[in-house]
Amino acid sequence: MNGRERILALLNGGRPDTLPLMPITMMFAADLLEIPYRRYATDYRTLVEGQMRTAEQFDFDYVSCISDPARETADCGGIIQYYDNQPPAIDESQALLADKSALVSLTIPDPHGGGRMHDRVQAAALFKERAGSSKLIEGWIEGPCALAADLRGINTLMLDFFDDPGFVRDLFAFAVEVALRFARAQVAAGADIIGVGDAAASLAGPRFYEEYIFPAEKKLIDGLHDLGTRVRLHICGDTRPILKNISKLGCAIVDLDWMIPIHQARREMGTGQVVLGNVDPVRVLRNGTPETVTAAIAECHRQAGKAYIVGAGCEVTRDTPKENLRALTAYAREHEP
Amino acid sequence: MPDLSKLSEAILKGDVKTAVEITKEALAAKVDPQEILDKYMIPAMDEVGRKFECNELFVPELLLTARVMKSALELVRPLLAASGAEPAGRVVIGTVKGDLHDIGKNLVASMLEGGGFEVTDLGVDVSPEKFVESAKSKNANLIAMSALLTTTMPSMKSVIAELNKQGVRGQVKVIIGGAPVTQQYADEIGADGYSDNANGAVGLARTLIKK
């Protein structure tokens, strides 16, 4: 089986030959090309080259359009801070929606309009050309809570839950529209699966997750399914209090960050939910040895059972020793689900 | 004389209006501001911190209670300063150079303030020189640094190097935190402490300042 077939076999309820392998790499991939991260995040050809080289060198089963959370916000008109050799970041002190009333005049950016979203759509298309059917191609979008936080400022958004629930709902509705339009363009360009990054969702707690974030995520994920694509949900941080609701979203893959005991996730989400993770990217994958990486991923696999994809809890950091990443690959290739 | 236990309750509930009203009434009734802070405000924020650590409260609630605490503190603090009362410690806090992520830093700053510390928040993208200059000018006994990226973590080491360079390392304790930061890293760079959560940072600050 090739990588694409392997992942799809698992997601379609079949039997892959080995465990699928889908660690998130961004700065690690740029470093492999020996280029500054700014180029990786702003030139789709470089991103595609970095992902292809990483996937080939470490036998990953997929390639991804992920680079940073600021693409949608940039095209909405937000202020983005660019750095030579780290991801672009959103400057919250100049948040686009510091004034809430600006939401009504905000328009959904055109993902083919020549901006940062367009660059990602072009990455999906080039992946299709280069990876064809050998690797699964992953598009990427910001989830509703993450994009709302990007536009409004995360600190302010957290207080908006108390101060102006109606605004939060309107903002999430806008974010879902942006996300669906962006995803549609990436799917049309060649993405097989859409990664949804909704990092801020783990901060809000179960009450606000259930009342505001879950309905918006559900609407987004149902919309993605209507596009005929699959969904990988990636929420950084401690999602334990919201795992049960996450399992109701219908995602093909749910990423688990490193602090979540997989057995607990399994208990909350059931045996059918495909989970991905969750070796600690810093303490184990970067700071450990091939032996400790192997032991950690074996324990993840043991707790996860069959519906499982090998990966780290979050992004593989740029200075991760290659032999440690190879240990992750070796484990995946030597084991069946 | 107002029922000051209601001030603690108002902080825990995130009720700014009641907290401010009770604080004003207490001050008008000549209750010692230090007593208001020590017996009612700080214990309330300690309880918030405990609940946050136990996953009973989350970031929105913590920010809300911190906002209430701040409103009440604004009434009490000038009187404390006028009486010459010393804070639990003086902290300079910021997100390190090249890093714009601030929610973790803000949570720690709020909890330290709620714990009776005088906090100078330098914001984000703070250079080592600015950390050290602020610590000196504020007569701080603690620097607290945050980083969310592995790429910006090395700036923490630069701050400690700058403290050494300016000959003031012995006068200020250094604590660090943030998603990629570990105790091992704190040890490697010679920081005095590390915490993986806001409540832990307050306990750590109290312990280090007592040393």
Image (cartoon, coloured by chain):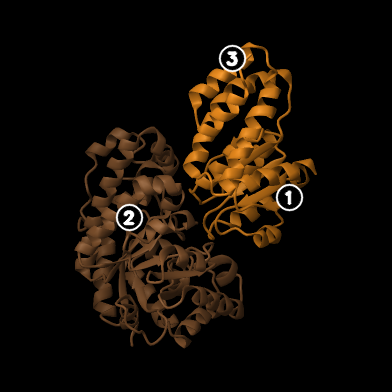
Chain colours: A brown, B orange
Type of amino acid under label 1:
Asn
Q: Secondary structure at mark 1?
A: helix
The image shows a total of numbered marks equal to 3
- Asked if badges 1 and 2 are on one and the same chain, I answer no
The residue identified by callout 1 is B164
Comparing labels 1 and 2, the label whose residue is closer to the camera: 2
Q: Quadrant of residue A21?
A: bottom left
* Residue at 55%, 52% in the rendered image: B147
Image quarter where the N terminus of chain A lies is bottom left
- Rounded to the nearest angstrom, the CA distance separating label 3 from label 1 is 48 Å
**Percent position of residue A208, x then y:** 40, 45
Which label was assigned to residue A71? 2
* Residue at 27%, 51% in the rendered image: A176
- How crowded pointer 3 is (Cα within 10 Å; few <14, some 14-19, many 20+) is rated as some
Contact, CB < 8 Å: mark 1 with mark 2? no
| Rendered position, A161 above or below B181 | above
What subunit carries mark 1? B
Q: Quadrant of residue B4?
A: top right
